[in-house]
Amino acid sequence: MKSNPGSLTCTRRIEFDAAHRVVNHESKCRHVHGHRYALEATFSARSLDRLGRIIDFGVIKERLGQWIDEHWDHTAILFDQDKELGSAMADITGQRIFYLPANPTAENMADYLMSEVCPALFGDLPIECVRLRLYETPNCYAESLSGQA
């Protein structure tokens, strides 16, 4: 058995599809386009539960997976300063829009999940999200680490 549970982590992978555009991007990413994102959410705890787990993988799916499904899956994730485009997309196509308070780069999306979403979803549990790795493509990802990692 591990004598220092704080050094143990568990990770759940969640995949979703979404469109975005990067405002003022110097190349083709300035246009609306889509990705098959993959999120790896890693958690740690000071001690394991009575079954020897940090958290049940199903709880991660239930909480974080549901948030992703409700807010990001099959939406257009836009910078909150890009509301004219978002309104037009919603009016013309009925597209669901999620406005991020920063340009929707993989880095900013991972940071938003780490700083805003995970604390709200898991704050009632004795665990901490220590790393979020968001793959924008199979070859490219951004990572947000907690201050503890």
Image: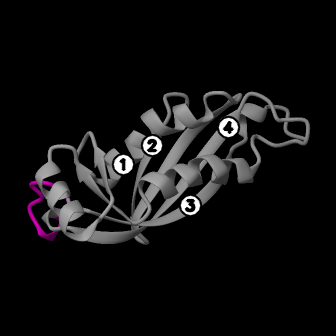
Answer above or below: position of 120 versus 141: above
Q: Which residue is mark 3?
A: 14
In the image: residue 115, left or right of residue 108: right
Label 4, label 3: how far apart the Cα atoms are: 18 Å
Labels 4, 3: front one:
3
In the image: residue 35, left or right of residue 38: left
Q: Residues within 10 Å of mark 3 (few under 14, many from 20)?
A: some
Labels 4, 2: front one:
2
Q: Residue at x 24, y 70 (%)?
A: 93
Amino acid type, callout 3? Ile
The first of marks 4 and 2 along the sequence is: 4
Label 4, label 2: how far apart the Cα atoms are: 16 Å
Front residue of this view, candidates 56 and 5: 56
> Pointer 2 and pointer 3: residues touching (CB < 8 Å)?
no
Q: Which residue is mark 4?
A: 44
Asked which secondary structure carries label 3, the reply is strand
Residue 110 falls inside the magenta stretch: no
Q: Residue at x 73, y 53 (%)?
A: 58
In the image: residue 94, left or right of residue 42: left
Q: Which residue is mark 1?
A: 109
Residue 100 at x, y percent in the picture: 29, 45
Quarter that holds the C terminus: top right
Residue 27 falls inside the magenta stretch: yes
Amino acid type, callout 4? Ser
Label 1, label 4: how far apart the Cα atoms are: 21 Å
Q: Residues within 10 Å of mark 1 (few under 14, many from 20)?
A: many
> Pointer 1 and pointer 2: residues touching (CB < 8 Å)?
yes
Q: Which residue is mark 2?
A: 113
Residue 40 at x, y percent in the picture: 55, 55
> Pointer 1 and pointer 4: residues touching (CB < 8 Å)?
no
